[in-house]
Amino acid sequence: MHPKRKNRLILILFMVVGLGAAVGLMMYSLSQNIDLFMTPTQIANGEVRPGQTIRAGGLVVEGSVARSDDGLNVSFSITDGAVNVTVEYEGILPDLFREGQGIVALGKVDSRNVMIASEVLAKHDEEYMSPEVKHALDSAHKDGVDELQKNTVEKVQHSPAAYKTQSTSEKQY
C-alpha cells in the first residue's frame, strides 16, 4: 500500500473511533440524566428500581401530612386514585403545597417503596395539572368506573328479581 494512502486510512480510522467514543460518552451521559415520570401505581407495582431517580406525581392524600418536631422533615402520601405512596421530604415545602393538591416530587425510591424526595413542586393554580398526572388520574378513575359497572351488572344478573323476570318473560312466549 502506498504510504500516502496508508496515512489517510489511519487518519480515517482514528476519526471513526474518536467519533464513536464521543457518541458513546454522550449517550451514557444522557441516560444518567433522564428522570422518568411514574405514577403511584407504577411505584407500588415495583416498576421502579430502588435508587432510580424519578418524578412521581399525584394528589396529596387528605390527612397524610406529618411534620417532624424540627419542621423540616415532612412525610405525606400521594395517590393517583388507585394506590397511595408515601413520600418523605426534608426541606421547605412550596407555599401552594396542601392536602388535596396536585404535586410532582423528584427523588429516589428506597427498598420500602417509599419515595425520598429531593424536590417537591406544587401546581401553580387550580386549573393546571401536568399532562402525566392528568392522564394517570383519568385512567385510574376510568378503571374504577369500569369495575363499578361490572360489579353492578353481576349483582343484577345474580339477584332473585332477575330470575323472576326471566321466568315471566319465558312464559309469555
Image (cartoon, grey):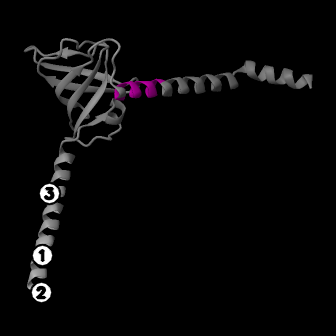
Secondary structure at numbered mark 3: helix
Asked if the residues shown at circle 2 and circle 3 are in contact, with their CB atoms under 8 angstroms apart, the answer is no
In the foreground, 6 or 64: 6
Residue sitting nearer the eye, 19 or 167: 19
Residue 85, position as x, y percentages in the image: 29, 27
Q: Identify the residue shown where x is 79% and y is 20%.
A: 164
Q: Nearer the viewer, mark 3 or mark 1?
A: 1
Residue 51 sits in quarter: top left
| Up-down relation of residue 171 to residue 97 (above or below) | below
Residue type (three-letter) at the residue carrying disc 2: His
Q: Which residues are magenta?
A: 132-141
> Residue 96 falls in which quadrant of the image?
top left
Secondary structure beneath label 1: helix
Determine whether, in the image, residue 135 is placed left or right of residue 19.
right
- What residue is shown with label 1? 8
Q: Which residue is mark 3?
A: 22
Instruction: Say what amino acid the circle numbered 3 marks.
Output: Ala
167 within the magenta span: no
Is residue 158 something one can see in this rendering? no
Image quadrant in which the C terminus is located: top right
Which quadrant holds residue 47? Answer: top left
Would residue 134 be counted in the magenta stretch? yes
Going 18% across and 11% down the picture, which residue do you hit?
95
Spatial CA span between label 1 and label 2:
10 Å
Q: Amino acid at mark 1?
A: Arg
Q: Earlier in the sequence, mark 1 or mark 2?
A: 2
Single out the mark in the foreground, 2 or 3.
2
Query: What separation in Å lies between label 2 and label 3 (alpha carbons)?
Result: 30 Å
Q: Secondary structure at mark 2?
A: loop
In terms of depth relative to the viewer, which is nearer, 117 or 19?
Answer: 19
Q: Report the residue marked by disc 2.
A: 2
Q: Position of residue 162 (x, y in %)?
A: 74, 21
